[in-house]
Image (cartoon, rainbow, N blue to C red):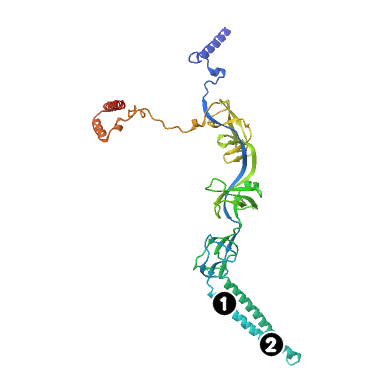
Amino acid sequence: MKKTIFLLSVISVFIISCGNSGSEGQPNPSMFGGNQGQRTTSVETSTIEMGTIAEQVRSYGNVKAQSVVSVVPQVSNRITDLYVDLGDTVRQGQILAKIYDATFRDQLTQARSQVEQSHIALRRDSSEFTRQQLLNERNLTSESELDIARASYQNSLAQLESARSSLSQALENLNNTEVKAPVNGVIISRALEAGDIANTGTELFQIASTNGYESRIYLPIQDWKAIQIGQKVNLRVSNESGVSARGIVSRKSPQLDATTGLGEVVITLTQTGDTIYPGVLVENVINITTKDRAIIVPRSALVEQVETVINPETNTIDLERTYSVFVSQGDSIAERRPLELGIEQGDKIEVLAGLIPEDRIIVTGQSGLEDGSRISVASGERFQAPEERQIEGESNGNRMGAGQNPLANMSEEERTAARQKMQGMSPEERMVFLRELRANQDSTADSTSN
C-alpha cells in the first residue's frame, strides 16, 4: 500500500513539472542548461596595442634664470635718473641709475682737505722729531722732550692714514651714486622710480643671467626617491599640447622639507622654444622607466572590482581592488580576464599578465557583462549619438499628425475666432470641434499636394 502511494506521488510531481513546460508543449530550456533566453549585449571591441609606455613623474614649476642677481644701492639718497627698464639687456659695469651726489661731492672735498692738513701736520712734527733727535745726540735736550716729539710725529702719521681712509670712503660713496650692473643679463624687476629715496639694503633691480634657464619642482617622497640625476625631462607650457622645452635633472636636494615633506628637484633646460620665458608655468614630465613592445590597454576598458576585507590583526576594514577586461570570443561570447597591471601613463595602462596580443578586448558596453555573457559586436557607429528623425506627418507636406494641435497652422485672426467659438463648449464638444478642424486642414493639404 505504501509503495502504491509513493509511486502515485512521483507520477503527480512529474505531470505537474511537464505542465509547467513551454506554453505550446515545448520543454523548458532551463531544465537542460540552455541559454536561449539570455540577453545579448551590443559591444564595441578593439585590438591590443603593442607600444612603448613610460612611468612618469609630473609636476608643475616656474621657469627662472639660473642666476638672478639683486642690485642694491650702496648709498642712500634720492634717485635722480633711471637709465634702464624691464626687459632691457645690460652688460657688466653699465650704469643703471643715478643717485643725487651733491652731498657726497662735499664729503669728498672735505676728505681731501683733511688729507692735506694731515700732510702739513706730519711734515711739521717730522721736522721737530728729527731736530730733537739731533739735540739728544749732543745732550742738549732731555729724554722727555724727545719722547714728546716722537709721540707728536706718530700721532700726525696716524691722522694722515685716517684722512686717507676717509678720502677713499668718500670717493667710493661718490662713485656708488652711479648704480652699475654687476653682471651681464636682463632686467626682470625694478622696485623704485625716479624721485624715490634709495636706501642701502633695499633692492633696486633684479638682473637675470642669460647663461640659461631652470625649473624647480617639489615632489612627495615616493616620486622624489625615484628621480635620478641626469634623467631627461620634457617641459610643456600649460596652454600648449606639445613639448615646449627639454632638459635634464641637474640637482636634487639631499633632504625633504621638514614643513611640507617635499623634496626639491632642479631641472636645467637644454633646449627651449619660443614660449619659454622667465616666470612661465610649465609641466615637467620626467620618464622614470620606459618599456618597449608592452601590451597596452585603455583605462576605460578596465572593470574594477572592490572587495571589503576585515583585517583580524588591526580590526580594520581594508579594500582590495582587482581589475579585469572582457575579451570577445568568436564575436558572440564575453570572457572575463583578470589582469596584472604595470606602468600607468595617462589613460594607458601596461598589462603584465592576462592578455595576449591577438586578443580583442571590449572597450564599450562592458559595464553590465558577466563571464560568458552573449554579445553582439557592433561598429563605432552604433554607439554614436542618434541623428534627428522627422516625426510622423512632418514629411508629408503640411498634413496634421494624430496628436498635433490644429490651431498651430492657423493665422492669428483664425486662431482668435476659433478660441471664441470654443468658449461656451463642453470638453466633449471642444474635442469634436478640434477633430473637425484637423480633418478640414488634412483635406486641404491633400488637395494642395495633388
* Amino acid on which disc 2 is placed: Ser
Q: Secondary structure at mark 2?
A: helix
Question: Tag 1: Cα neighbours inside 10 Å, few (<14), some, or many (≥20)?
Answer: some
Q: Which residue lies under the disc numbered 2?
A: 127
Q: Earlier in the sequence, mark 2 or mark 1?
A: 1
Against 318, is 233 above or below? below
Depth check: give the residue in front, 150 or 22: 150
Q: Residue drawn 68% across and 82% down? A: 154
* Amino acid on which disc 1 is placed: Gln
Q: Residue drawn 64% across and 50% down? A: 249
Depth check: give the residue in front, 68 or 424: 68
Q: Which residue lies under the disc numbered 1?
A: 107
Question: Tag 2: Cα neighbours inside 10 Å, few (<14), some, or many (≥20)?
Answer: some
Report the label total: 2
Q: Secondary structure at mark 1?
A: helix
Image position of 441 (left or right of 335): left
* Marks 2 and 1 in Cβ contact (< 8 Å): no
| Rendered-image quadrant of the N terminus | top right
